[in-house]
Image: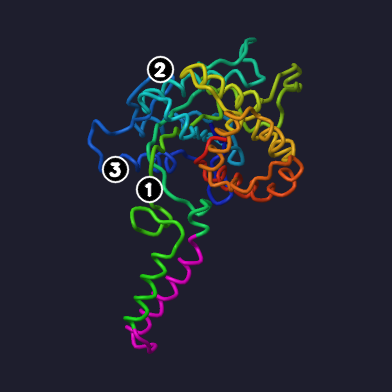
């Protein structure tokens, strides 16, 4: 499971309306029949329109300055292994999202009217999506880029010849383009993988729009707080503040595992990802020390993410020293693409 929490910005400024983001999320519904359309939902409601989402989120920004985020985006990206555990991607991910938002509320070190924050204080709207497209951060696009650059140059040469600005053999240039198209290392359905091309396989994920203000439009609830748990003085009274991301990410896994009886491998855990970021040597040492069956699954998960593991040495010291850079490159790209659940 890979979850991101981001503040929505436009040209380095915080978005003043959620309308553009809602329009972006509605694009996947274009051309679909009524029974295929995915609507917005929240903790208790279904089939919520994009218009209502915009009205509710944009209208819940009391006393927020232009320099402050009005809403946050939470993206929930289950791995291919987690998706296989689901019976119905739409229904199960909605159920999971509603339980996840309970974890989100519990992760705030805040009180409202003398009680802890709960899910009924959170104003949010979510939408399940089933498609992903290749982005510039994906390994497939990066590794195909040298071929794409050469193809673009050859196409420009053809246009110049056709416009009479240059001389050359168009037929020969087209043959070179055809050869480069086939030689590109990443192909899908007989075509070179390019940006914007839909990814194959199960790609279901969830986008959640969360208001910065609570449902009463009185209290600020920021998951972007730099504090996990602290207190400050406001109007002469002590006020709790903070959001514990570690607690939230760990709870997100426990909730999924409990709901769908999922047995999580070490390579899929938030703990593993955090260990990798802080101490790569320890991360690989733990991987190498897993029981054989768990290690096999872990390596399979990493291989699916495009991480080179075929040449992993058996010696732990070699493992730590020789493959860190390759693993780091592979994992970093996987995480950026949001397509793996490690």
- Give the residue pinned by disc 1: 198
Q: Mark 3, mark 1: which one is toward the viewer?
A: 1
Q: Which mark is residue 92?
A: none
Of the residues under marks 3 and 1, which one precedes in the sequence? 3
Q: Magenta residues: mostly which secondary structure?
A: helix
Residue 38 higher or lower than 338, as above or below: above
Q: Mark 2, mark 1: which one is toward the viewer?
A: 1
**Rendered image coloring scheme:** rainbow
Q: Nearer the viewer, residue 269 or 287?
A: 287
Q: Nearer the viewer, residue 133 or 227?
A: 133
CA gap, disc 3 and disc 1 = 15 Å
**Which residue lies at the image location 56% right of the left edge and 40% below the top edge?**
302
Q: Nearer the viewer, residue 105 or 202?
A: 202
Label 2's element? loop
Q: Which mark is residue 30?
A: 3
Of the residues under marks 2 and 3, which one precedes in the sequence? 3
Determine if the magenta segment contains residue 31. no
The answer to whether residue 239 is left or right of residue 184 is right
**Which residue lies at the image location 29% right of the left edge and 43% below the top edge?**
30
- Would you call the spot at circle 2 few (<14 residues within 10 Å), some (14-19), or many (20 or more)? few
Of the residues under marks 2 and 1, which one precedes in the sequence? 2
The answer to whether residue 229 is left or right of residue 9 is right
Label 1's element? loop
Determine if the magenta segment contains residue 165. yes
Residue farthest toward the top in the current orientation of the protein = 114
- Would you call the spot at circle 3 few (<14 residues within 10 Å), some (14-19), or many (20 or more)? few
**Which residue lies at the image location 50% right of the left edge and 32% below the top edge?**
76
Highlighted range, magenta: 144-169
Q: Position of residue 2 (x, y in %)?
A: 55, 34
Q: Position of residue 273 (x, y in %)?
A: 64, 35
Q: Which mark is residue 44?
A: 2
**Which residue lies at the image location 36% right of the left edge and 34% below the top edge?**
50
């Amino acid at each position: 499971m890979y979850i991101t929490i981001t503040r929505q910005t436009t040209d380095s400024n915080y978005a003043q309306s959620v309308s553009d983001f809602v329009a972006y999320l509605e694009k996947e519904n274009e051309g679909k029949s009524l029974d295929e359309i995915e609507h917005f939902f929240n903790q208790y409601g279904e089939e919520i329109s994009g218009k209502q989402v915009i009205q509710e989120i944009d209208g819940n920004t009391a006393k927020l300055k232009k320099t402050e985020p009005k809403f946050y985006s939470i993206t929930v990206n289950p791995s291919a292994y987690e998706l296989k555990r689901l019976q119905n991607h739409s229904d199960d991910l909605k159920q999971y999202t509603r339980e996840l938002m309970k974890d989100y509320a519990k992760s705030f070190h805040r009180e409202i009217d003398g009680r802890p924050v709960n899910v009924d204080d959170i104003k949010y709207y979510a939408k399940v999506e089933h498609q992903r497209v290749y982005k510039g951060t994906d390994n497939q696009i990066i590794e195909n880029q040298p071929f794409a650059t050469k193809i673009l140059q050859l196409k420009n040469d053809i246009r110049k010849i056709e416009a009479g600005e240059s001389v050359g053999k168009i037929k020969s240039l087209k043959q070179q383009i055809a050869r480069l198209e086939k030689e590109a290392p990443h192909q899908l359905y007989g075509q070179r993988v390019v940006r914007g091309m839909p990814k194959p396989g199960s790609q279901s994920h969830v986008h959640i729009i969360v208001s910065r203000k609570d449902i009463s439009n009185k209290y600020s609830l920021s998951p972007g707080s730099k504090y996990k748990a602290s207190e400050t003085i406001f109007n002469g009274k002590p006020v709790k503040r903070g959001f514990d991301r570690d607690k939230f990410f760990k709870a997100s896994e426990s909730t999924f595992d409990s709901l769908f009886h999922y047995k999580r491998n070490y390579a899929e855990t938030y703990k593993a990802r955090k260990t990798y970021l802080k101490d790569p040597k320890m991360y690989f040492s733990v991987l190498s020390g897993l029981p054989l069956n768990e290690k096999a699954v872990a390596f399979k998960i990493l291989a699916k993410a495009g991480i080179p593991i075929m040449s992993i040495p058996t010696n732990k010291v070699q493992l730590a020293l020789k493959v860190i850079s390759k693993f780091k490159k592979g994992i970093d790209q996987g995480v950026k693409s949001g397509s793996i659940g490690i």
